[in-house]
Image (spheres, helix red, strand yellow):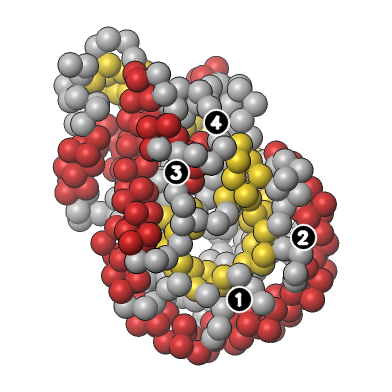
């Protein structure tokens, strides 16, 4: 039996070009000339027999998640890495008082390790069959610096994404949550892109009141939007509020990005508070948790839409029938995706990585099928945590 001999957690910081924060201080926006420091972390799990599982965290690898990852990483040495279900169950309980955000990156690294030990891709282990994933361009938040600063900026960027091959486009609006501005942009996108692209709106909980969410939702109805996501400042956690919103608009709701794991997501569905479920292998307790949510949604006749982008996300989507789009986030006309440039194998989630067919490929190598730039991570490392058997 292979056992885990060593776990490493590498913290590192890099700079994203032409990126800053919006007026609220948390969401990335275009900032010409800006050099925004971004901190992430990577997990390495090694066995006694020399097998190595790796994962570099993306949107879920925040400073707030790091403490939970360190707690769980310290409990891995000496365990059988193939017992992912048992580890999932025990780690889920261990974080019962917290938000579980540090769990997913550990689980993904364990899946990478399993694939490498068995000589198969994660997609193969999951029973995947999709090799190319239909993608949508998911914008950065609106700015006031000439990137995405007006309805016409969004329309022009949607046209550019269409020319690259995308057939889906999602708008993230402005921090101010101005109803007239949001609704005008939604309707402009509907007029210019409707019928050619599936259109989505994610205010990211910027809208201030239920009334604001309702007004913008009715604009989505007028524009024929595919879904409406996390509109207002309940922060996407109130089932009763979203059930009421569903009763008053026609556009399908995509909620549950901000509740963790299978049980609260199913509570939302049973409460008729969403039309699609949202899930993310980094946010929702790993690939193990992601697939539980996908299968539960399938049992209820619902689609599950995967949040964010990354190798783990692609492998999960390859094995899920009831899903529609791969999210390429966050992109804009004058800024690159601010995710860390940590691949040396040609893997990319940049806007221009889309194929002419509007799709991204699923990696085919063992495990996650990507090769990381450990020299880059070492050069930018700010801290190394090591746990040994």
Other-residue count near label 2 (Cα within 10 Å), few / some / many at <14 / 14–19 / ≥20: many
Which quadrant would residue 28 be assigned to in this image?
A: bottom right
The answer to whether residue 244 of the structure is visible from this angle is: yes
Query: Where residue 343 appears, x then y in whole percent?
Result: 58, 26
Element under disc 3? loop
Q: CA distance from mark 3 to mark 4?
A: 13 Å
Image quarter (top left, top right, bottom left or bottom right) of the N terminus: top left
Residue at the top extreme of this rendering? 49
- Disc 1 target residue: 177
Query: Where residue 317 appears, x then y in whole percent?
Result: 49, 46
- How many labels, in total? 4
Other-residue count near label 4 (Cα within 10 Å), few / some / many at <14 / 14–19 / ≥20: many
What residue is rendered at 34% in x and 66% in y? 300
- Disc 2 target residue: 158
Question: In this image, 175 relative to 93: left or right?
Answer: right
Other-residue count near label 3 (Cα within 10 Å), few / some / many at <14 / 14–19 / ≥20: many
Which label lies toward us, 2 or 3?
3
- Disc 4 target residue: 363
Q: CA distance from mark 1 to mark 2?
A: 21 Å
Query: Where residue 82 appears, x then y in whole percent?
Result: 24, 27
- Which is more toward the observer, 274 or 92? 274
Q: CA distance from mark 1 to mark 4?
A: 38 Å
- Which is more toward the observer, 314 or 43? 314
Q: CA distance from mark 2 to mark 4?
A: 27 Å
Q: Is residue 50 above or below residue 352?
A: above
The disc, 1 or 4, on the residue closer to the chain's N-terminal end is 1
Element under disc 2? helix
Which label lies toward us, 1 or 3?
3
- Disc 3 target residue: 319
Q: Is mark 1 in CB contact (under 8 Å) with mark 2?
A: no
Question: In this image, 382 relative to 289: left or right?
Answer: right
């Amino acid at each position: 039996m292979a056992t885990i001999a060593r776990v490493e957690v590498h913290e590192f910081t890099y700079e994203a070009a032409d990126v800053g924060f919006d007026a609220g201080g948390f969401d990335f926006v275009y900032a010409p000339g800006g050099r925004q420091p971004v901190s992430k972390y990577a997990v390495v799990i090694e066995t006694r027999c020399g097998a190595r599982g790796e994962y570099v965290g993306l949107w879920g690898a925040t400073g707030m998640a790091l403490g939970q990852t360190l707690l769980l990483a310290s409990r891995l040495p000496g365990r059988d890495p193939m017992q992912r279900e048992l580890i999932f169950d025990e780690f889920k309980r261990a974080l019962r008082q917290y938000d579980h955000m540090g769990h997913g990156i550990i689980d993904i690294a364990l899946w990478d390790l399993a694939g490498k030990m068995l000589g198969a891709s994660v997609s193969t282990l999951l029973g995947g069959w999709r090799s190319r994933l239909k993608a949508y361009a998911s914008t950065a938040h609106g700015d006031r610096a000439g990137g995405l600063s007006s309805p016409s900026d969004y329309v022009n960027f949607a046209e550019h994404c269409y020319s690259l091959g995308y057939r889906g486009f999602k708008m993230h609006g402005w921090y101010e949550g101005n109803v007239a501005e949001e609704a005008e942009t939604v309707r402009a996108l509907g007029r210019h892109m409707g019928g050619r692209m599936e259109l989505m709106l994610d205010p990211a909980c910027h809208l201030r009141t239920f009334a604001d969410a309702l007004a913008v939702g009715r604009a989505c109805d007028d524009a024929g939007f595919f879904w409406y996501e996390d509109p207002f400042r309940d922060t996407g956690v109130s089932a009763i509020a979203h059930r009421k919103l569903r009763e008053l608009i026609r556009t399908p709701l995509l909620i549950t990005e901000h509740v963790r794991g299978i049980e609260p997501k199913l509570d939302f569905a049973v409460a008729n508070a969403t039309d699609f479920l949202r899930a993310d292998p980094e946010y929702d307790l790993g690939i193990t948790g992601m697939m539980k949510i996908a299968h539960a949604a399938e049992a209820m006749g619902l689609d599950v839409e995967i949040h964010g982008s990354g190798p783990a996300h692609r492998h999960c989507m390859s094995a899920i029938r009831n899903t529609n789009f791969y999210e390429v986030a966050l992109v804009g006309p004058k800024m690159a995706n601010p995710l860390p440039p940590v691949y040396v194998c040609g893997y990319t989630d940049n806007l221009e990585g889309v194929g002419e067919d509007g799709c991204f490929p699923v990696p085919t190598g063992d495990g996650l099928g990507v090769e990381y730039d450990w020299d880059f991570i070492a050069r930018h490392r700010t801290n190394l945590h090591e746990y040994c058997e």
